[in-house]
Image (spheres, rainbow, N blue to C red):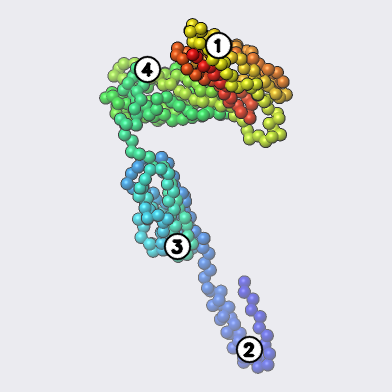
Amino acid sequence: MYKIHFTLQGVFSSSLFSKFFLLFFFSFVFSFTSIPSFAQNSTLDFEESEFDFGKVEFQDTLTHRFYFTNNTENEIKILDISTDCACSFSNETTKMAIQKEERSFVEVVFLPYSYGSFAKVFTIKTDKAGTQTLMLKGELQPVLNKNRDFKYTVEKTPEIRTRTKYLHFGNVLNKVPMTKKFEFYNSSKEDVVFTGKMEMPNHLQVRFDSTHILKAGETSAIYVIYDPLLKNDFGYLEDIITLFGEQNKKTIKLDFKVTANVEEYFPALNIEMLEAYPELKVEDDYINLGSHYLKNLNGKDSLEATFVLKNESNMPLKVHRIIEGYGCKLITEKSEWNQISPHSNAIVKVIFQTPEDRGTYVRSLTVICNDPRKPIRTMKIKAILR
């Protein structure tokens, strides 16, 4: 609302001028209130401002349409569509007009030039709705070559090939189940129809990628779910999954080895919080057995090393696993070192297996425990054979 205040003095108080002034005043107010009011948004209402292609094979052109609606009270013109790279542009001509409440789109184009991740920015400039930034992103991968990329054959069924030798999960924390996708390729001329029958440990599950049919000459995938809590073990672990199928009216079995390196999960801890956790100390983690004549050993495993594991805390220490390295044989029963009471020790005895040839040898063992400071420890044994 507009308020106008006038003070009439002298000549302006005459009746003739008063009539003239009132006529002018009302004409002014009428014409002023007749001016239309324009309310507009700062940008066009895009349905998305970012589009992710995900992992896609390398190709000449990637195109996407960003849809929007003109929710302002005006016709709006797109004046310019600029990009951050010469490899990207828009198919739209500038100065295109979009009517009120009209739904339209902007089509943007990216011309790939290398493998890997990309993120391309497009800036839309309008005459009455400001600017809007849009983005295309994704990861470009080499074009699939089935014979090159699927080089490992499934045992007893060589026509079925995989990308990797094992279905490997990598490092897995014993916190929540982990799901991973594994692809395979049917290089034969006959389809494989999976029956749904499977054999696997309880901590593993398999889901098929949309269909139970692996067509001849095509690729497909399975999703494997690994539950480390159900596995209840640590370190490098191996399991077998067996899938049953039919090919040319014959029953076939596909055996896949599933591997994972399971580690214990610890939250972020400060120095004070560490006091609530057990602490492991190995009295001597490198034992030198000295020099021995090979002929005196007579091929017997007569060299022995003893490690002392100490729990230097007020909490029970759990040794999840001791992994024997090549040439080592653990002879102490698990029950003697699996749980160590506060401020107590456990004795671990190991046989250094005698090699066939002279030389200097170093064997190792790996201890996995619930000490968050260093949950994985390596102990070594050295011997010289003459």
- On screen, residue 114 above or below 335: below
**Amino acid at dot 4:** Lys
Q: Nearer the viewer, mark 4 or mark 2?
A: 4
For the N terminus, the image quarter is bottom right
**Amino acid at dot 2:** Ser
Q: Which residue does the numbered mark 1 point to in the structure image?
A: 303
Q: Which residue does the numbered mark 2 point to in the structure image?
A: 18
Residue 126: image tag: 3
Circle 1 Cα neighbour tier, 10 Å, few/some/many (<14 / 14–19 / ≥20):
some
Determine the CA span between mark 3 and mark 4: 62 Å
Q: Nearer the viewer, mark 1 or mark 2?
A: 1
Q: Which residue does the numbered mark 4 point to in the structure image?
A: 253
**Amino acid at dot 1:** Leu
Number of numbered callouts drawn = 4
Q: Secondary structure at mark 1?
A: strand
- The mark that comes first in sequence, 1 or 3, is 3
